[in-house]
Amino acid sequence: MKLRQLQYVTEVVKNGMNVTAAAEKLFTSQPGVSSQIKRLEEELGVTIFERSGKHINGLTPEGELLAARFELILDEVNNVKRIADDFSHPNSGLLSIATTHTQARYVLPPVITEFRKRYPNVQLQINQGTPEQIASLTDTGQADIGIATEALELFDNLILLPCYRWNRCLIVPKGHELTKLPELTLEAIAQNPIITYTFGVADRSVINRAFKQNHLDLNVVLMAADAEVIKTYVRNGMGIGIVARMAYDKAQDQDLAVIDVGNLFDSSVTSLAIRKNAVLREYVYEFIQLFASHLNRDVVDQAMKAYNDTSLQEKLYQEFVKEAAMR
């Protein structure tokens, strides 16, 4: 039994039983992957995959048990490598971050700038996607950490570390009638065509919930995952924009007016996710604390040790939320 064979099985499962896709991810050939998996099955004396001809339909019951163990073995191999690298090459390596456009564009730049000063030999990789994609990339180990506001809690293999609270603002053309109101209300906003985030991005459900609770219709004329796109169409006169407060740039958005609406919507919490069984490099701990100052190494280690205790997890989560500052 070879580690490469275990990796082939794991990658086929991760790619929805698609051997060709798994081979491409592993930079090898489809016949090579199939051949090595067959050899592993022969050596173990069990059938791992259910097949129809050459097509893989899924895992057999015994295959499900073995695939889970294979993934644990590969995780531990990676953990051993990380521990060794922290001793042999403490200030170099790769840090892969999965996050949303909003985090990458508006929150991460100063964090990454400072991190690069401290670790110039660490290569950074930023993978942008939806919250679901971010959670999946972190869950499968393709990203060291994931940063998002939603969907991370859907994956049992992830530990959530709340980082900061945030709320929304209204972006309108300068001189817009809403800027002249003594007090902005949801009723006044509802009378305008609205441009905001697509579902599953930037906790869009909070916006919908506020209007629904006040029995108001939400006239959304355009949805986008990118705040810059939303601002572009506000400039074009299509409607008013509801975006994350951090997405307003004083320097670049001088032609637009910003109205704080934090009193109209519930605040949201952005969390950082790490895998439960992962060993973190020293520079990963430092990046986490740069992103959220209350998440020092002791706090992160405490959260990782508590992952099997549901009640303790919830207690720690609530403590972290209290520590999270508003941005």
Image (cartoon, rainbow, N blue to C red):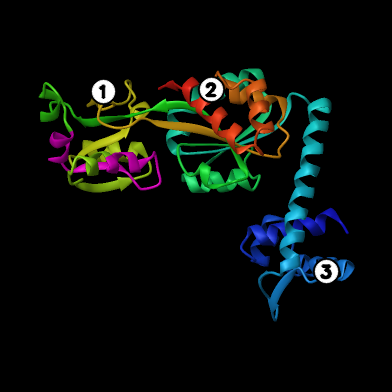
The three-letter code of the residue at mark 1 reads Gln
> How crowded is the residue under tag 1: few (<14 C-alpha within 10 Å), some, or many (20+)?
few
Check disc 3 and give the amino acid type. Glu
Query: Badge 3: how crowded within 10 Å, few (<14), some, or many (20+)?
Result: some
Residue beneath the point at 72% across and 57% down: 10
Q: Which of the two discs, 1 and 3, labels the residue nearer the N terminus?
A: 3
Q: Contact (CB < 8 A) between labels 2 and 3?
A: no
| 299 on left or right of 88 | left
Residue 87 position by quadrant? top right
Q: Position of residue 165 (x, y in %)?
A: 42, 26
Residue 144 located left or right of residue 38: left
Label annotation for residue 254: 1
Q: Which residues are magenta?
A: 186-209
The quarter holding residue 84 reads top right
Between discs 1 and 2, the one toward the N terminus:
1
Q: Are marks 1 and 3 in contact (CB under 8 Å)?
A: no
- Rendered location of residue 166, percent (x, y): 39, 27
* SS for callout 2: loop
Per the image, the residue denoted by label 2 is 292
What residue does disc 3 label? 41
Residue 225 within the magenta-colored segment of the rendering: no
Q: Nearer the viewer, residue 214 or 20?
A: 214
Q: Amino acid at mark 2?
A: Ala
- The quadrant of the picture occupied by the C terminus is top left
The residue positioned farthest toward the bottom in the image shown: 53
Callout 2 crowding tier (Cα within 10 Å): few <14, some 14–19, many ≥20: many
Query: On the picture, is 210 further left or further right than 217?
Result: right
Is residue 119 shown to the viewer in this render?
no
* Disc 1/disc 2 C-alpha distance (Å): 29 Å
Of marks 1 and 2, the one in the foreground = 2
Identify the residue at image location x=35%, y=37%.
Answer: 227
